[in-house]
């Protein structure tokens, strides 16, 4: 299989490329930088995925497309100025429009588009258990995800579309842990906000596993890419500190987060208890369903 990827040089994308190559597939990665792979199975096409260009022709020869590009939401921590929101939106929505345009222009379209989204689609929902049938929220991230998903679904007249509503990802070489670890390793880590808000998460190995399932099986529509056991921020912090053999007695109060990050603080304060119902229904066996084992594997 020949797979075209946007975001292939990012944290998740690198792992997906390595997994596909390991299974004997070919990958074509669009990149604005100079990243290279030590593999003849990976071709790098120069281009800006947020803008139309010659790179789109590489989509025409692909059997599948994986669309993962997106500027960081809060890492490094940015206040959401209008300019920053525009960058976040363009990196997701405009790039997806360009990918879909290329798919629809192909004489023989790829058979599947696997496209990114996020559990921010649901907005902060307290204790409610959220599967893929739950309605969207109404904040900036929710509206962004709605637009992002609609852009991907415009390809449904040409190919199967799977949308990945991904939780914060745990990994050794990237993901949500990286900005936390320095403080936690020094024993200065702790919860944020009340700590009672629900925190959904997933290990990078299961993100890759779910993407591979989405490529290979007849799975369309939205899929929650989360581990099956969400927990509170307090529980998450307690487990992380335990794995590191460090105390975690500090706490960042809600007012301090809002003062520092403004509207962007909602990404940390939102309560999202998300269930991967569709993946469980497929029989997918999570490699890391429990947090302690996931953290031990990472750390």
Image: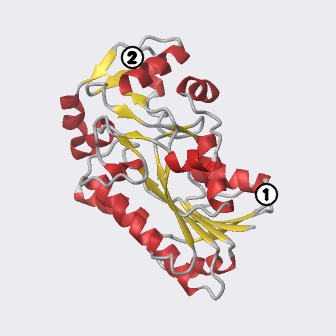
- Quadrant in the picture for the C terminus: top right
Circle 1 — which element? loop
Question: Dividing the picture into quarters, in which one does residue 20 lie?
Answer: bottom right
- Quadrant in the picture for the N terminus: bottom right
**Few, some or many residues within 10 Å of mark 2 (<14, 14–19, 20+):** some
Q: Relative to 92, does residue 232 appear above or below in the rendering?
A: above
Residue in view at x 69 percent, y 61 percent: 216
Residue in view at x 40 percent, y 15 percent: 248
Residue in view at x 26 percent, y 46 percent: 79
Q: Gap in Å between the C-alphas at discs 1 and 2? A: 41 Å
| The one of 148 and 13 positioned closer to us in this rendering | 148
**Few, some or many residues within 10 Å of mark 1 (<14, 14–19, 20+):** few
| The one of 165 and 86 positioned closer to us in this rendering | 165
Residue ID for mark 1? 39
Residue ID for mark 2? 188
Mark 1 vs 2: CB contact within 8 A: no
Question: Dividing the picture into quarters, in which one does residue 188 lie?
Answer: top left
Residue 183 seen in render: no
Which numbered disc, 1 or 2, marks the residue that appears first in the sequence? 1
Q: Position of residue 233 (x, y in %)?
A: 37, 27
Q: Position of residue 77 (x, y in %)?
A: 34, 41
Question: Dividing the picture into quarters, in which one does residue 76 lie?
Answer: top left
Whether residue 283 sits left or right of residue 238 in the image: it is right
Q: How many marks?
A: 2
Q: Relative to 140, does residue 197 appear above or below in the rendering?
A: above
């Amino acid at each position: 299989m020949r797979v075209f990827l946007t975001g292939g040089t990012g944290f998740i994308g690198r792992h997906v490329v390595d997994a596909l190559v390991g299974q004997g597939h070919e990958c074509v990665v669009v990149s604005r930088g100079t990243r290279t792979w030590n593999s003849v199975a990976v071709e790098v096409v120069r281009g800006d995925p947020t803008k139309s260009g010659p790179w789109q022709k590489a989509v025409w020869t692909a059997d599948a497309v994986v669309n993962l590009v997106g500027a960081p939401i809060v890492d490094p921590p940015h206040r959401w100025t209008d300019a920053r929101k525009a960058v976040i939106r363009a990196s997701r929505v405009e790039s997806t429009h360009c990918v879909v345009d290329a798919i629809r222009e192909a004489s023989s379209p790829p058979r599947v588009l696997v496209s990114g989204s996020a559990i921010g689609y649901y907005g902060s929902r307290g204790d409610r258990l959220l599967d893929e049938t739950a309605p969207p929220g109404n904040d900036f991230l929710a509206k962004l995800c709605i637009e992002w998903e609609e852009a991907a679904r415009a390809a449904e007249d040409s190919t199967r579309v799977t949308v990945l509503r991904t939780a914060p990802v745990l990994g050794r070489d990237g993901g949500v842990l990286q900005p936390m670890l320095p403080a936690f390793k020094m024993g200065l880590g702790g919860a944020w906000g009340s700590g009672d808000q629900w925190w959904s998460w997933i290990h990078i190995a299961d993100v890759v596993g779910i993407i591979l399932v989405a490529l290979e099986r007849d799975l369309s529509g939205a899929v929650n890419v989360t581990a099956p056991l969400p927990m509170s921020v307090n529980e998450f912090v307690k487990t992380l500190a335990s794995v590191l053999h460090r105390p975690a007695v500090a706490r960042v109060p809600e007012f301090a987060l809002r003062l520092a990050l403004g509207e962007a603080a909602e990404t940390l304060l939102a309560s999202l208890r998300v269930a991967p119902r569709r993946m469980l229904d497929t029989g997918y066996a999570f490699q890391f369903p429990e947090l302690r084992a996931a953290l031990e594997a990472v750390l």
